C-alpha cells in the first residue's frame, strides 16, 4: 500500500473531469482525474477547489498523479482514512 498524502484541490477543469492537488507542505502538484476519486464522478463533483483531500501517489509519464482521492475527514466530508487518523477525529461527524 502506498503512503497516504494530504493536500488541497487548487484547480479543477470540470468540463474535462480533471484537476490538480497541491501538497500541504510544498508547491508540488498532482494531477487527478475523476476516475481516480474514490466515489467516482460524484466524488469529483462534490470536492470543489479548496477541499482538503487524501490520496496516494501514482507514477505517470507526464508527472505525479494522484489515485484513491477522497475528501479528508478534516473537511467534514468523509470518514477518517486510517486508524491513526481516528485519534484526531474528535470533531468528525458522520
Image: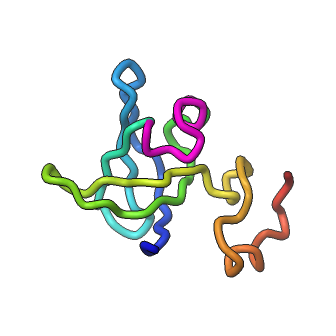
Q: Please indicate whether residue 14 sits to the left or right of residue 42 in the image.
A: left
Residue 39 painted magenta? yes
Rendered residue at 84%/70% (across/down): 90
Name the residue at 83% across, 63% down: 91
**Span of residues in magenta:** 35-45
For the residue pair 90 and 35, the one nearer the viewer reads as 35
Residue 25, image quadrant: bottom left
Residue 25 as seen in the image, left or right of residue 76: left
- Above or below 45: residue 30: below
Q: How many marks?
A: 0
* Rendering coords of residue 65 (x, y %): 30, 53
- Foreground: 30 or 67? 67
| Residue at 71 percent of width and 47 percent of height | 77
Percent across and percent down for residue 20 are 35, 44
Where is residue 9 shown, x and y percent of the image? 46, 46
Judge by depth and name the residue closer to the eye, 1 or 13.
1
Residue 56 in magenta?
Answer: no
Q: Nearer the viewer, residue 89 or 60?
A: 60
Q: Residue furthest front?
A: 1
Q: How is the image coloured?
A: rainbow
Q: Position of residue 56 (x, y in %)?
A: 43, 63
Left or right: 78, with 28 as reference point: right
- Residue at the location (34% across, 67% down)? 26
- The majority secondary structure of the magenta stretch comes to helix
Identify the residue at the far left of this view: 61
Amino acid at each position: 500500500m502506498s503512503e497516504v498524502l494530504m493536500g488541497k484541490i487548487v484547480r479543477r477543469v470540470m468540463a474535462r473531469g480533471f484537476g490538480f492537488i497541491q501538497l500541504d507542505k510544498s508547491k508540488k502538484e498532482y494531477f487527478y482525474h475523476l476516475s481516480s476519486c474514490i466515489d467516482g464522478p460524484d466524488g469529483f463533483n462534490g470536492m470543489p477547489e479548496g477541499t482538503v483531500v487524501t490520496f496516494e501517489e501514482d507514477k505517470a509519464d507526464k508527472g505525479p498523479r494522484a489515485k484513491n482521492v477522497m475528501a479528508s475527514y478534516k473537511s467534514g466530508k468523509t470518514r477518517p482514512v486510517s486508524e491513526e487518523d481516528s485519534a484526531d477525529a474528535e470533531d468528525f461527524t458522520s
